[in-house]
Amino acid sequence: MTASRTTDRARLGHRLRYAYRHPDRVVPYLRRLGRDWRLRLTARDHVAYYRAVMKADTAKSPSAAVGSATEDRWLALGEMQFDYLLRHGLAPEDRMLEIGCGGLRAGWRFIEHLDVGHYHGIDISPEILLAAGDTLAARGLQAKLPHLTLVRDLRLSALPSGYFTVVHAHSVFSHSPIEVIDECLRHIARVMAPDAFFDFTFNRTTGKEHHVLREDFYYRVETLTELAASRSLSARLMEDWEQLPHKQSKIRVRRGDASGTQEVGTGERLQR
Ligand SMILES: C[S@@+](CC[C@H](N)C(=O)[O-])C[C@H]1O[C@@H](n2cnc3c(N)ncnc32)[C@H](O)[C@@H]1O
Protein backbone atom coordinates (compact mmCIF):
# COMPACT_ATOMS: atom_id res chain seq x y z
CA MET A 1 0.00 0.00 0.00
CA THR A 2 1.38 3.38 -0.99
CA ALA A 3 0.62 6.35 1.28
CA SER A 4 -1.94 8.66 -0.31
CA ARG A 5 -2.50 12.39 0.12
CA THR A 6 -5.02 11.63 2.91
CA THR A 7 -2.80 9.22 4.89
CA ASP A 8 -2.03 10.28 8.47
CA ARG A 9 1.45 8.78 8.91
CA ALA A 10 1.44 9.54 12.62
CA ARG A 11 -1.43 7.09 13.28
CA LEU A 12 -0.48 3.90 15.05
CA GLY A 13 -2.47 1.80 12.56
CA HIS A 14 -0.56 3.26 9.62
CA ARG A 15 2.77 2.75 11.37
CA LEU A 16 2.01 -0.89 12.17
CA ARG A 17 0.87 -1.63 8.61
CA TYR A 18 3.98 0.13 7.28
CA ALA A 19 6.24 -1.92 9.58
CA TYR A 20 4.54 -5.13 8.40
CA ARG A 21 5.18 -4.23 4.77
CA HIS A 22 8.72 -2.90 5.30
CA PRO A 23 10.29 -5.02 8.05
CA ASP A 24 13.78 -3.82 7.03
CA ARG A 25 12.83 -0.27 8.03
CA VAL A 26 11.74 -1.10 11.57
CA VAL A 27 15.17 -0.96 13.24
CA PRO A 28 16.19 2.35 11.55
CA TYR A 29 12.82 3.79 12.56
CA LEU A 30 13.27 2.70 16.18
CA ARG A 31 16.71 4.34 16.21
CA ARG A 32 15.17 7.59 14.95
CA LEU A 33 12.42 7.28 17.54
CA GLY A 34 15.03 6.97 20.30
CA ARG A 35 16.83 10.05 18.91
CA ASP A 36 13.51 11.89 18.79
CA TRP A 37 12.87 11.24 22.51
CA ARG A 38 16.39 12.31 23.46
CA LEU A 39 16.26 15.49 21.38
CA ARG A 40 12.81 16.43 22.67
CA LEU A 41 14.36 16.53 26.14
CA THR A 42 17.59 18.29 25.20
CA ALA A 43 16.94 20.58 22.21
CA ARG A 44 15.69 24.03 23.23
CA ASP A 45 13.68 24.57 20.04
CA HIS A 46 13.00 23.04 16.64
CA VAL A 47 16.07 24.52 14.96
CA ALA A 48 18.30 23.01 17.67
CA TYR A 49 16.45 19.72 17.23
CA TYR A 50 16.86 19.64 13.46
CA ARG A 51 20.45 20.85 13.59
CA ALA A 52 21.23 17.80 15.78
CA VAL A 53 19.41 15.53 13.29
CA MET A 54 21.50 16.98 10.45
CA LYS A 55 24.72 16.59 12.44
CA ALA A 56 24.08 12.89 13.02
CA ASP A 57 22.84 12.21 9.48
CA THR A 58 25.62 14.18 7.75
CA ALA A 59 28.25 12.23 9.70
CA LYS A 60 26.88 9.06 8.08
CA SER A 61 26.37 10.46 4.56
CA PRO A 62 25.98 14.09 3.40
CA SER A 63 23.83 13.02 0.44
CA ALA A 64 21.56 10.77 2.52
CA ALA A 65 21.25 13.62 5.05
CA VAL A 66 19.44 15.71 2.41
CA GLY A 67 17.28 12.77 1.38
CA SER A 68 19.20 11.16 -1.51
CA ALA A 69 20.19 7.56 -0.85
CA THR A 70 22.54 7.35 -3.85
CA GLU A 71 24.81 9.65 -5.85
CA ASP A 72 22.53 9.19 -8.86
CA ARG A 73 19.47 10.34 -6.86
CA TRP A 74 21.45 13.28 -5.45
CA LEU A 75 22.34 14.39 -8.97
CA ALA A 76 18.82 13.79 -10.31
CA LEU A 77 17.10 15.74 -7.50
CA GLY A 78 19.43 18.67 -8.01
CA GLU A 79 18.86 18.60 -11.75
CA MET A 80 15.09 18.54 -11.30
CA GLN A 81 15.20 21.70 -9.16
CA PHE A 82 17.57 23.45 -11.54
CA ASP A 83 15.71 22.55 -14.73
CA TYR A 84 12.43 23.72 -13.19
CA LEU A 85 13.79 27.16 -12.34
CA LEU A 86 15.50 27.39 -15.71
CA ARG A 87 12.12 26.79 -17.39
CA HIS A 88 10.78 29.59 -15.18
CA GLY A 89 13.33 32.03 -16.50
CA LEU A 90 16.25 31.82 -14.05
CA ALA A 91 18.86 34.06 -15.69
CA PRO A 92 22.58 34.50 -14.90
CA GLU A 93 21.92 38.01 -13.63
CA ASP A 94 19.32 36.84 -11.09
CA ARG A 95 20.33 37.22 -7.46
CA MET A 96 19.37 34.01 -5.75
CA LEU A 97 18.81 33.10 -2.12
CA GLU A 98 18.57 29.40 -1.34
CA ILE A 99 17.10 28.71 2.09
CA GLY A 100 18.29 25.38 3.51
CA CYS A 101 20.88 24.95 0.76
CA GLY A 102 22.25 21.76 2.31
CA GLY A 103 25.28 20.29 0.54
CA LEU A 104 24.45 22.16 -2.71
CA ARG A 105 22.60 19.26 -4.36
CA ALA A 106 20.93 21.85 -6.61
CA GLY A 107 23.06 24.75 -5.43
CA TRP A 108 26.15 23.85 -7.43
CA ARG A 109 24.08 24.00 -10.62
CA PHE A 110 22.64 27.40 -9.64
CA ILE A 111 26.14 28.67 -8.81
CA GLU A 112 27.49 27.46 -12.16
CA HIS A 113 24.64 29.18 -14.02
CA LEU A 114 24.55 32.48 -12.13
CA ASP A 115 26.95 35.41 -12.43
CA VAL A 116 29.83 35.63 -9.97
CA GLY A 117 28.61 36.31 -6.43
CA HIS A 118 24.92 35.99 -7.31
CA TYR A 119 24.19 32.88 -5.22
CA HIS A 120 23.58 33.02 -1.48
CA GLY A 121 22.88 29.82 0.45
CA ILE A 122 21.87 29.72 4.11
CA ASP A 123 21.49 26.73 6.40
CA ILE A 124 21.20 25.93 10.10
CA SER A 125 23.65 23.02 9.95
CA PRO A 126 27.41 23.67 10.16
CA GLU A 127 28.11 20.09 9.12
CA ILE A 128 26.11 20.28 5.90
CA LEU A 129 27.69 23.65 5.07
CA LEU A 130 31.10 21.97 5.32
CA ALA A 131 29.78 19.38 2.86
CA ALA A 132 28.64 22.29 0.66
CA GLY A 133 32.24 23.55 0.63
CA ASP A 134 33.36 20.11 -0.50
CA THR A 135 30.81 20.18 -3.34
CA LEU A 136 32.04 23.60 -4.45
CA ALA A 137 35.62 22.38 -4.52
CA ALA A 138 34.73 19.13 -6.30
CA ARG A 139 32.85 21.06 -9.00
CA GLY A 140 35.62 23.65 -9.37
CA LEU A 141 33.25 26.55 -8.67
CA GLN A 142 35.43 28.56 -6.28
CA ALA A 143 35.76 31.49 -8.72
CA LYS A 144 31.97 31.95 -8.69
CA LEU A 145 32.32 33.32 -5.15
CA PRO A 146 29.04 32.04 -3.74
CA HIS A 147 27.99 33.11 -0.24
CA LEU A 148 27.31 30.28 2.21
CA THR A 149 26.05 31.39 5.60
CA LEU A 150 25.18 29.59 8.81
CA VAL A 151 21.98 30.91 10.39
CA ARG A 152 20.24 30.27 13.67
CA ASP A 153 16.74 31.27 12.49
CA LEU A 154 14.83 32.49 9.44
CA ARG A 155 14.61 36.16 10.38
CA LEU A 156 17.10 36.82 7.54
CA SER A 157 18.42 39.76 9.54
CA ALA A 158 21.93 39.68 7.99
CA LEU A 159 20.60 39.92 4.42
CA PRO A 160 20.03 43.12 2.40
CA SER A 161 16.58 44.59 1.75
CA GLY A 162 14.91 44.34 -1.67
CA TYR A 163 17.87 42.40 -3.07
CA PHE A 164 17.03 38.84 -4.14
CA THR A 165 15.15 38.21 -7.39
CA VAL A 166 14.69 34.45 -6.85
CA VAL A 167 14.31 32.68 -3.51
CA HIS A 168 14.24 28.89 -3.36
CA ALA A 169 13.68 26.41 -0.53
CA HIS A 170 13.53 22.76 -1.51
CA SER A 171 12.60 20.18 1.11
CA VAL A 172 13.02 22.60 4.00
CA PHE A 173 9.43 23.37 5.04
CA SER A 174 8.78 19.62 4.77
CA HIS A 175 10.95 19.44 7.89
CA SER A 176 9.57 22.56 9.59
CA PRO A 177 6.80 23.20 12.11
CA ILE A 178 4.38 25.98 11.24
CA GLU A 179 6.06 28.56 13.49
CA VAL A 180 9.33 28.21 11.54
CA ILE A 181 7.50 28.62 8.22
CA ASP A 182 5.66 31.63 9.62
CA GLU A 183 8.91 33.19 10.76
CA CYS A 184 10.25 32.88 7.22
CA LEU A 185 7.08 34.27 5.63
CA ARG A 186 7.12 37.21 8.07
CA HIS A 187 10.60 38.23 6.96
CA ILE A 188 10.96 37.11 3.36
CA ALA A 189 9.30 40.11 1.66
CA ARG A 190 11.93 42.45 3.10
CA VAL A 191 14.78 40.75 1.24
CA MET A 192 12.89 40.21 -2.03
CA ALA A 193 13.13 42.57 -4.99
CA PRO A 194 9.68 43.88 -6.01
CA ASP A 195 9.19 41.35 -8.84
CA ALA A 196 10.91 38.44 -7.09
CA PHE A 197 9.34 35.09 -6.38
CA PHE A 198 9.92 32.59 -3.60
CA ASP A 199 9.35 28.90 -4.36
CA PHE A 200 9.18 26.37 -1.55
CA THR A 201 8.26 22.70 -1.47
CA PHE A 202 6.26 21.02 1.26
CA ASN A 203 4.71 17.67 2.10
CA ARG A 204 1.08 17.96 1.08
CA THR A 205 -1.87 16.34 2.75
CA THR A 206 -5.52 16.68 1.89
CA GLY A 207 -6.41 15.05 5.20
CA LYS A 208 -5.38 15.82 8.77
CA GLU A 209 -2.17 17.82 9.19
CA HIS A 210 0.43 15.84 11.11
CA HIS A 211 4.11 15.23 11.61
CA VAL A 212 6.36 12.20 12.05
CA LEU A 213 9.09 12.40 14.73
CA ARG A 214 9.25 16.23 14.30
CA GLU A 215 11.33 15.45 11.18
CA ASP A 216 8.59 15.34 8.53
CA PHE A 217 5.61 17.71 8.52
CA TYR A 218 2.47 17.46 6.36
CA TYR A 219 0.36 20.53 5.51
CA ARG A 220 -2.76 21.35 3.57
CA VAL A 221 -2.27 23.81 0.68
CA GLU A 222 -4.79 26.24 2.20
CA THR A 223 -2.91 26.38 5.51
CA LEU A 224 0.19 27.66 3.75
CA THR A 225 -1.49 29.97 1.23
CA GLU A 226 -3.59 31.52 4.03
CA LEU A 227 -0.52 31.92 6.21
CA ALA A 228 1.23 33.68 3.31
CA ALA A 229 -1.80 35.95 2.79
CA SER A 230 -1.76 36.84 6.49
CA ARG A 231 1.81 38.06 5.90
CA SER A 232 0.74 40.14 2.86
CA LEU A 233 2.15 37.67 0.31
CA SER A 234 0.30 36.20 -2.64
CA ALA A 235 0.69 32.44 -2.95
CA ARG A 236 -0.27 29.77 -5.43
CA LEU A 237 0.30 26.07 -5.93
CA MET A 238 2.60 25.35 -8.87
CA GLU A 239 0.60 22.87 -10.96
CA ASP A 240 3.46 22.19 -13.41
CA TRP A 241 5.65 20.95 -10.53
CA GLU A 242 2.93 18.39 -9.73
CA GLN A 243 3.69 16.69 -13.07
CA LEU A 244 7.26 15.89 -12.00
CA PRO A 245 8.26 12.65 -10.26
CA HIS A 246 8.58 14.17 -6.78
CA LYS A 247 6.50 13.52 -3.66
CA GLN A 248 6.41 17.10 -2.46
CA SER A 249 4.31 19.96 -3.82
CA LYS A 250 5.51 23.48 -4.55
CA ILE A 251 4.06 26.89 -3.70
CA ARG A 252 5.22 30.19 -5.19
CA VAL A 253 4.85 33.38 -3.19
CA ARG A 254 5.31 36.96 -4.24
CA ARG A 255 5.29 40.23 -2.41
CA GLY A 256 1.74 41.48 -2.02
CA ASP A 257 2.73 44.70 -3.76
CA ALA A 258 4.37 42.87 -6.70
CA SER A 259 3.49 44.24 -10.11
CA GLY A 260 4.83 44.22 -13.66
CA THR A 261 5.30 40.45 -13.79
CA GLN A 262 2.97 38.02 -15.44
CA GLU A 263 3.03 34.28 -15.58
CA VAL A 264 1.79 31.95 -18.27
CA GLY A 265 0.41 28.44 -17.78
CA THR A 266 3.78 26.88 -17.09
CA GLY A 267 4.54 29.68 -14.67
CA GLU A 268 7.14 31.09 -17.04
CA ARG A 269 8.20 34.63 -16.25
CA LEU A 270 7.40 37.00 -19.10
CA GLN A 271 8.71 40.26 -17.73
CA ARG A 272 11.11 41.27 -15.01
C1 LIG B 1 16.32 17.80 3.00
S1 LIG B 1 17.61 18.97 3.12
C2 LIG B 1 17.50 19.77 1.52
C3 LIG B 1 18.73 20.54 1.18
C4 LIG B 1 18.69 21.24 -0.19
N1 LIG B 1 17.60 22.19 -0.25
C5 LIG B 1 18.59 20.20 -1.29
O1 LIG B 1 17.59 20.16 -1.99
O2 LIG B 1 19.52 19.42 -1.37
C6 LIG B 1 16.95 20.23 4.20
C7 LIG B 1 17.99 21.30 4.52
O3 LIG B 1 17.34 22.39 5.16
C8 LIG B 1 18.10 22.78 6.29
N2 LIG B 1 17.14 23.39 7.21
C9 LIG B 1 16.18 22.79 7.95
N3 LIG B 1 15.50 23.69 8.66
C10 LIG B 1 16.04 24.90 8.36
C11 LIG B 1 15.76 26.23 8.77
N4 LIG B 1 14.79 26.50 9.65
N5 LIG B 1 16.51 27.23 8.26
C12 LIG B 1 17.49 26.97 7.35
N6 LIG B 1 17.81 25.73 6.93
C13 LIG B 1 17.08 24.71 7.43
C14 LIG B 1 18.74 21.50 6.78
O4 LIG B 1 19.86 21.74 7.58
C15 LIG B 1 19.08 20.81 5.47
O5 LIG B 1 20.32 21.19 4.98
Image (spheres, helix red, strand yellow):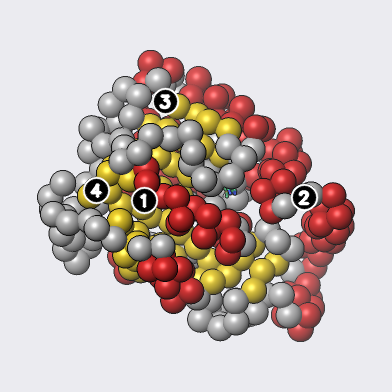
Residue at which label 1 appears: 189
Q: Residue at x 42, y 68 (%)?
A: 230
Residue 267 picture quarter: bottom left
Give the secondary structure at mark 2. loop
Residue at which label 2 appears: 44
Residue at which label 3 appears: 146
Q: Residue furthest top?
A: 143
Q: Of the two numbered discs 2 and 3 on the same chain, state the one appearing first in sequence.
A: 2
**What amino acid is at disc 2?**
Arg
Residue at which label 4 appears: 194
Q: Residue at x 17, y 56 (%)?
A: 259
Establish whether ligand 1 lies closer than 8 Å to the Cβ of label 4. no
Rendering coords of residue 98 (x, y %): 44, 41
Give the secondary structure at mark 3. loop
Q: Of the two numbered discs 3 and 1 on the same chain, state the one appearing first in sequence.
A: 3
Q: How far is the residue under mark 4 from the one under mark 2? A: 36 Å
Q: Residue at x 30, y 57 (%)?
A: 254
Rendering coords of residue 236 (x, y %): 33, 68
In contact (CB < 8 Å): disc 4 and disc 1: no
Q: How far is the residue under mark 4 from the one under mark 1? A: 9 Å
- Does residue 179 appear to the left or right of 242 in the view shown? right
Check the picture and name the quadrant holding the N terminus: bottom right
Residue 3 picture quarter: bottom right
**What amino acid is at disc 1?**
Ala
Label 2: few (<14), some (14–19) or many (≥20) C-alpha neighbours in 10 Å: few
Q: Residue at x 65, y 32 (%)?
A: 126
Of tags 3 and 1, which is closer to the observer?
A: 1
Q: How far is the residue under mark 2 from the one under mark 3? A: 31 Å
Give the secondary structure at mark 1. helix
Q: Of the two numbered discs 4 and 2 on the same chain, state the one appearing first in sequence.
A: 2
Q: Of the two numbered discs 2 and 1 on the same chain, state the one appearing first in sequence.
A: 2
In contact (CB < 8 Å): disc 3 and disc 1: no
